[in-house]
Image (tube, coloured by chain):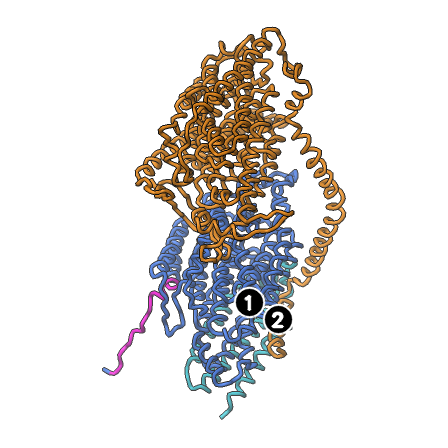
Chain colours: A orange, B cyan, C blue
């Protein structure tokens, strides 16, 4: 399989090519038809064949191709997993022989920097690949149903497959540049998919916001790469000048990053610290952490399969993957590790609280995702890498399930996302309802189901390793999570439907089948690292060198009891409110009645958007308008146009020498000869 | 015996005459002849040097030059005929539609 | 009568194989042409011949063999350049295939003539003696004179041919006279032996800057500079490029340059490394003037063929940087540049061919208006070509220009690298103008002109685009290949 690993990203790429060609063909045919239809009517050149609202057959065709490609990738990854398992298990701590590193060609070379195009396949990347291709396949299948009424399903699947390619590059690359290629690639696909419905008002803006915010983070990642290239030395003291993971993260090399240090504002920073800090900036962008999390909720403007795949299960976890991959650097910088933990905890709490104030079914899930990513980041900061990976996997599954469930609700509820209009949908959408309940159980940590184990492992690690405050704060976050999920379940599925104009119906089997699959996976996913067996810890141990976490019954019991109480509180509170007609469309929440301005702050997302608007966006726009309307027009254009004018003038002048007369050409020739002879004579 | 220097000097003079001929004459046929003069002055120099060194390399070169010159003129005259048919002139200054 | 025995000369087929085979094959095609007028047969035969010639190069690729009293050499550099030339020739035939009958130029001699010219070029690339250099230059030139005048019922084709012939003969005079002078001073015509002779001079204390020798070197370089259209010996280029049938222009603009530059490289690096400071300085000035002149005058052109002619002058300046760098880096950069430029320029001309109607007097920039709507794929391809010519990443044009400037910089020709970068910026103006015209200007109200994107032409364009993107994305594969040149050129 090592020989065929390149097929895993290549297959979706093939899907991109096939679907692009099919799409072009469709376009040509529809144009021909339009031409035929309007043959005598040039005034109305509306050349869109799929302008109706019926089922679009291309969705099934393109979707099946796309799903098949990702599915085959999943199978290949499974085979790779089996192959890695077949390699001898490490016997001593720190030894790892379950990996292979294949370089296909020398991609770029600048001086002594050589960037190979190659893959590093080890326990970590295979785990990520399984998540990407496995959950990816289910979401692709789901999207066949979801996009069946859309005008451009083929384009959608092209983007979706392209995303899979980029994400695989990100996790499979054997060097920082390959990772960056994937990192930017997923950013691009995210941009394209958030703005997929570009005719509408919000999606284009949301996509721009996501892209720009991510660029801020990318700056950090780039700076970290430059610093690693410039500073890393081999154990013998010579410069390494490499960006290949296995060379940079080698123990002897990584330690060299501690040798440099600089004083900045009274504090000493080592190179490792600076690099880790820059990496962290990248992580806050991609994984939507404070202060760069603001793009993720807006990203919900994209189609729901996108939210599930990119903005819940895979892309946003890239930051967590990056930190685990580069954990040797973070471990050299304890102060940055504390910052990581702090950011994670703060994000977990802030986002969970904001989720309380949202009425949009997807926005609740979006902030929930931000919050859960905060849990993972906090875990990485504490050094609980296995726990972070564990939560990443379980969250990837149950959050994908929840998003797909919400998508099914939206799809079956006339594309309406406001929970205040819903209610009582459990009868009309039984499959969606039950699978949604399973996803919720995973998220709130219902005993013995996925989130129960993974969240508990993080909190347990906090108490075990003297991060008591962190542990307590995370418990608060978990309690808030349970509360808003109780609120959501009640508002969406219980009581009576509040907006009677909408005809709700269960979604097609294309959509419910993946829901059921993901629900089963959610129920089983706790087994990935169940206490007492710890398969994930054993698997990742050679990479993270971490012991198996202990299970704390008392902590688990406290978290579970508090969580269930909070869930019940949220659930019954809103059931009561619904019964007494206290939930109405366009009316503020019950909690606002009691909480007042504090709740308004939650509704306004703690004012992050307003702050960024006032501090960054507005001054930036003012500056841009100064440059755009004055500086560029008057000064730059003046210089450029002047130069262009000069060039054009001299060009027209020199043209006259090209007179068309052979003898004048010969004369020019002879002048050249005289110059040559004169040069040699006078030299 | 005439010294090599004299031959080379003569060849240089001939070459210069050829160059000036191309520069100042208008008639395509005369211009061809000037080019021929340039080539043959080079031949003269080659043979003179060859003789001075008492070896045959330079003389062999002249055969190639003569052959090439003949081929060039063959093509040139054919072209000239077609141009003459179109413009009824052999004056190169009248062949001046391509410029700028 | 026994003392008269005929000694068969020893023929080293490895060395002579590529040019000789192609020459013989061209004659064969010429004979076949007498019996059939089916141009499909002719192009198939020609392409096969090119393929076999390329395969002959692959047969002994890697070894360095000299033959015919060291007048010709078979080495990696030569084979690589030959391959590029053969590829360029094949592309030329593909894009000319449907154009020639459309322009009523259906004479079958076209194919053997192109093969003859190519054969001369292969010969020139492998030449390591002044005599063989002369023969190579003239073989390709005479075939090109005829090709330039191939559309002779059109007056401008004949005019272009006679101008090319007169000035070409003029340059040939300088070439021969230069050879004579070098031979006179050193007594040698073989490049390597000239170098040995000069080093004996050095060891015996004889001054190298003998005026007659320097004049000889200068004359030969001028004649080769004429072939690559180096300023101020470039004057024929725009007129000839405009007048010649478009595929011939495309062919000349890439193949002649490649072969002449290869000869220049060998001439400078093998025979006269001792005079390196002199020629680096003098021809550095010429290179700078060529880059500046070509790019500036191109700005003032509205006729597309002329614009590409001036652009090709400018590109000759860039390639000259690689030659002048006279280092391993420079030579490999030159080879990659030649490949990139061959693909790009042929592609650009192919697009013009696809749009050129019969009897069209001039091809103006405004004829491209609305092409983006009329035929988006063709416009897309043209966009790639223009980006590549302008040196925009990730095209081959960028990667190869980067390599050239880098080599020049490392060879202490930093002022040339800087001029190169600045003139590239200027060049972006007229290349991007083409793109803007295609995509953002609407066609005039008149009936839209048909396009002739036939199968063979589309194939040629496709190959060019793929090649450009491949070189652009992974330039290292090609640079590594070119770096692996075991140089008989420069030790």
Q: Who is closer to the viewer here, B69 or C331?
A: C331
Q: Quadrant of the N terminus of chain A?
A: top left
- Residue B12 location, x and y as percent? 56, 81
Percent position (x, y) of residue A334? Answer: 53, 42
Is residue A3 in sight in this rendering? no
Q: Is residue A369 above or below residue C315?
A: above
In the displayed structure, would residue A585 be above or below residue B72? above
Where is residue C1? Give x, y as percent. Answer: 24, 83
Toward the bottom, the furthest residue is B1
Q: Is residue A106 left or right of residue A566?
A: left
Q: Is residue A627 shown left or right of residue C275?
A: right
Q: CA distance from mark 2 to mark 1?
A: 10 Å
Foreground residue among B97 and C306: C306
Estimate how packed mark 1 is, as few (under 14), some (14 to 19) or many (20 or more) residues with alpha carbons within 10 Å: many
Q: Chain of mark 2?
A: A
Residue at the outermost left position: C2
User: What kind of element bears circle 2?
Assistant: helix
Vertical position of residue C481 compared to residue A77: above or below: below
Q: Which residue in the protein does label 1 denote?
A: C225
In which image quadrant can residue C310 be found? Answer: bottom right
Q: Position of residue C305 (x, y in %)?
A: 59, 53
Marks 1 and 2: in contact by CB < 8 Å? yes
Q: Residue at x 68, y 61 (%)?
A: A654
Q: Is residue B100 magenta?
A: no
Label 2, on which residue? Answer: A672
Residue A238 in sight from this viewpoint = yes
Q: Quadrant of the C terminus of chain A?
A: bottom right
Dot 2 surroundings within 10 Å: few (below 14), some, or many (20 or more)? some
In the structure shown, which secondary structural element does the residue marked by tag 1 occupy?
Answer: helix
Q: Point out the stretch of residues depicted in magenta.
A: C3-20
Q: Chain of mark 1?
A: C
């Amino acid at each position: 399989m090592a020989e065929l690993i390149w097929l895993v990203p290549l297959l979706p790429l093939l899907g991109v090519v096939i679907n692009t060609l099919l799409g072009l063909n469709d376009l040509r045919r529809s144009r021909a038809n339009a031409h035929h239809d309007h043959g005598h009517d040039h005034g109305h050149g509306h050349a869109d064949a799929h302008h109706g609202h019926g089922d679009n057959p291309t969705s099934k065709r393109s979707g099946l191709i796309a799903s098949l490609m990702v599915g085959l990738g999943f199978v290949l990854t499974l085979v790779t997993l089996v192959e890695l398992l077949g390699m001898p298990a490490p016997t001593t701590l720190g030894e790892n022989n379950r990996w292979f590193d294949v370089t296909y060609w020398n991609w770029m070379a600048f001086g002594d920097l050589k960037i190979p195009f190659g893959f590093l396949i080890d326990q970590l990347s295979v785990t990520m690949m399984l998540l990407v291709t496995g959950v990816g396949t289910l979401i692709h299948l789901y999207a066949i149903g979801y996009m069946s009424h859309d005008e451009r399903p083929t384009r959608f699947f092209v983007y979706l497959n392209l995303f899979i390619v980029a994400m695989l590059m990100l996790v499979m690359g054997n060097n920082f540049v390959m990772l960056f290629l994937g990192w930017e690639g997923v950013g691009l696909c995210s941009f394209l998919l958030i703005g997929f419905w570009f005719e509408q008002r919000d999606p284009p803006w949301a996509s721009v916001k996501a892209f720009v915010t991510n660029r801020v983070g990318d700056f950090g990642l780039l700076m970290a790469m430059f610093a690693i290239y410039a500073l890393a030395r081999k154990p013998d003291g010579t410069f390494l000048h490499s960006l290949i993971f296995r060379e940079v993260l080698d123990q002897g090399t990584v330690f060299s990053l501690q040798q440099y240090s600089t004083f900045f504002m009274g504090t000493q920073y080592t190179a490792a610290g600076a690099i880790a800090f820059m990496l962290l900036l990248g992580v806050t962008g991609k994984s939507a952490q404070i202060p760069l999390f603001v793009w993720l909720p807006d990203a919900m403007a994209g189609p729901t399969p996108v939210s599930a795949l990119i903005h819940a299960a895979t892309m946003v976890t890239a930051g967590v993957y990056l930190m685990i991959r580069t954990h040797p650097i973070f471990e050299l910088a304890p102060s940055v590790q504390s910052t990581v933990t702090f950011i994670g905890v703060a994000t977990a709490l802030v986002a969970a609280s904001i989720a309380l104030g949202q009425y949009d079914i997807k926005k609740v899930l979006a902030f929930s995702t931000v919050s859960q990513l905060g849990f993972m980041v906090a875990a990485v900061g504490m050094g609980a890498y296995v726990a972070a990976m564990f939560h990443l996997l379980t969250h990837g599954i149950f959050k994908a399930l929840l998003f797909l469930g919400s998508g099914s609700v939206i799809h079956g509820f006339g594309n309406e996302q406001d929970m205040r209009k819903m209610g009582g949908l459990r009868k009309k959408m039984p499959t969606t309802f039950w699978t949604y309940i399973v996803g919720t159980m995973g998220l709130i940590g219902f005993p013995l189901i996925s989130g129960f184990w993974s969240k508990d492992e993080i909190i347990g690690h906090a108490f075990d390793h003297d991060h008591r405050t962190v542990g307590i704060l995370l418990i608060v976050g978990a309690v808030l999570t349970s509360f808003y999920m109780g609120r959501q379940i009640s508002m969406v599925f219980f009581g009576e439907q509040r907006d009677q104009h909408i005809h709700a119906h269960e979604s097609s089997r294309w959509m419910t089948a993946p829901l059921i699959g993901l629900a089963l996976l959610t129920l089983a996913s706790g087994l990935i690292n169940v206490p007492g067996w710890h398969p994930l810890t054993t698997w990742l141990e050679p990479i993270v060198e971490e012991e198996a976490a202990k299970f704390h019954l008392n902590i688990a019991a406290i978290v579970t009891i508090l969580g269930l109480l909070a869930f019940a509180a949220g659930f019954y509170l809103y059931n009561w409110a619904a019964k007494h007609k206290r939930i109405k469309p366009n009316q503020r929440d019950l909690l606002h009645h009691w909480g007042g301005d504090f709740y308004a702050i939650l509704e306004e997302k703690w004012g992050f958007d307003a702050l960024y608007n006032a501090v960054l966006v507005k001054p930036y726009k003012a500056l841009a308008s100064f440059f755009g309307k004055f500086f560029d027009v008057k000064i730059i254009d003046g210089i450029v146009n002047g130069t262009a004018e000069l060039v054009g003038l001299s060009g027209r002048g020199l043209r006259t020498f090209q007179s068309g007369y052979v003898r004048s050409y010969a004369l020019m020739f002879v002048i050249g000869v005289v110059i040559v002879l004169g040069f040699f004579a006078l030299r | 015996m005439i010294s090599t220097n004299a031959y080379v000097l003569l060849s240089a003079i001939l070459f210069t005459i050829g160059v000036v001929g191309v520069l100042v004459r208008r008639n395509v046929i005369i211009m061809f002849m000037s080019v021929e003069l340039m080539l043959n002055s080079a031949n003269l120099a080659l043979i003179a040097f060859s003789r001075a060194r008492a070896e045959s390399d330079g003389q062999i070169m002249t055969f190639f030059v003569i052959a090439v010159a003949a081929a060039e003129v063959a093509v040139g005259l054919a072209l000239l005929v077609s141009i003459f048919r179109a413009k009824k002139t052999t004056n190169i200054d009248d062949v001046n539609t391509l410029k700028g | 009568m026994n003392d008269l025995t005929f000694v068969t000369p020893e023929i080293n087929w490895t060395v002579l194989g590529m040019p000789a085979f192609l020459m013989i094959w061209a004659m064969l095609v010429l004979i076949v042409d007498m019996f059939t007028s089916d141009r499909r047969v002719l192009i198939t035969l020609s392409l096969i011949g090119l393929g076999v010639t390329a395969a002959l190069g692959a047969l002994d690729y890697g070894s360095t063999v000299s033959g015919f009293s060291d007048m010709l050499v078979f080495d990696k550099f030569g084979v690589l350049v030959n391959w590029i030339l053969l590829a360029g020739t094949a592309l030329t035939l593909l894009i000319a295939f449907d154009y020639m009958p459309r322009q009523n130029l259906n004479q079958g001699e076209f194919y053997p003539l192109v093969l003859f010219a190519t054969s001369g070029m292969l010969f020139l690339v492998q030449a390591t003696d002044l005599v063989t250099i002369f023969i190579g230059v003239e073989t390709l030139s005479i075939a090109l004179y005829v090709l330039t005048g191939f559309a002779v019922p059109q007056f401008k084709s004949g005019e272009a041919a006679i101008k090319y012939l007169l000035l070409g003969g003029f340059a040939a005079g300088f070439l021969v006279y230069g050879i004579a002078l070098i031979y006179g001073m050193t007594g040698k015509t073989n490049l390597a032996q000239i170098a040995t002779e000069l080093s004996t001079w050095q060891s015996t204390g004889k001054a190298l800057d003998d005026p007659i020798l320097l004049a000889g070197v200068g004359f030969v370089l001028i004649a080769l500079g004429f072939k690559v259209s180096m300023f101020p010996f470039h004057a024929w280029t725009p007129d000839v490029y405009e007048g010649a049938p478009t595929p011939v222009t495309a062919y000349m603009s890439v193949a002649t340059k490649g072969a002449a530059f290869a000869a220049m490289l060998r001439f400078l690096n093998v025979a006269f490394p001792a005079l390196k400071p002199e020629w680096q300085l003098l021809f550095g000035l010429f290179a700078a003037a060529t880059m500046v002149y070509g790019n500036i005058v191109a700005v003032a052109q509205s006729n597309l063929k002329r614009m590409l002619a001036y652009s090709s002058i400018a590109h000759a300046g860039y390639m000259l940087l690689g030659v002048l760098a006279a280092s391993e880096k420079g030579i490999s950069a030159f080879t990659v540049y030649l490949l990139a430029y061959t693909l790009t320029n042929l592609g650009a001309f192919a697009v013009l061919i696809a749009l050129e109607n019969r009897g069209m007097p001039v091809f103006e920039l405004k004829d491209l208006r609305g092409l983006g709507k009329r035929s988006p794929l063709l416009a897309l391809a043209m966009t790639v070509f223009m980006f590549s010519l302008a040196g925009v990443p990730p095209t081959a044009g960028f990667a190869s220009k980067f390599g050239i400037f880098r080599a020049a910089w490392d060879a202490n020709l930093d002022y040339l690298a800087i001029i190169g970068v600045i003139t590239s910026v200027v060049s972006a103006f007229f290349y991007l103008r083409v793109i803007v015209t295609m995509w953002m200007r609407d066609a005039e109200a008149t009936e839209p002109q048909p396009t002739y994107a036939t199968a063979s032409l589309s194939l040629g364009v496709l190959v060019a685009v793929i090649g450009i993107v491949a070189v652009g994305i992974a330039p290292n594969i090609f640079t590594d290949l070119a770096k692996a040149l075991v140089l008989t050129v420069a030790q």
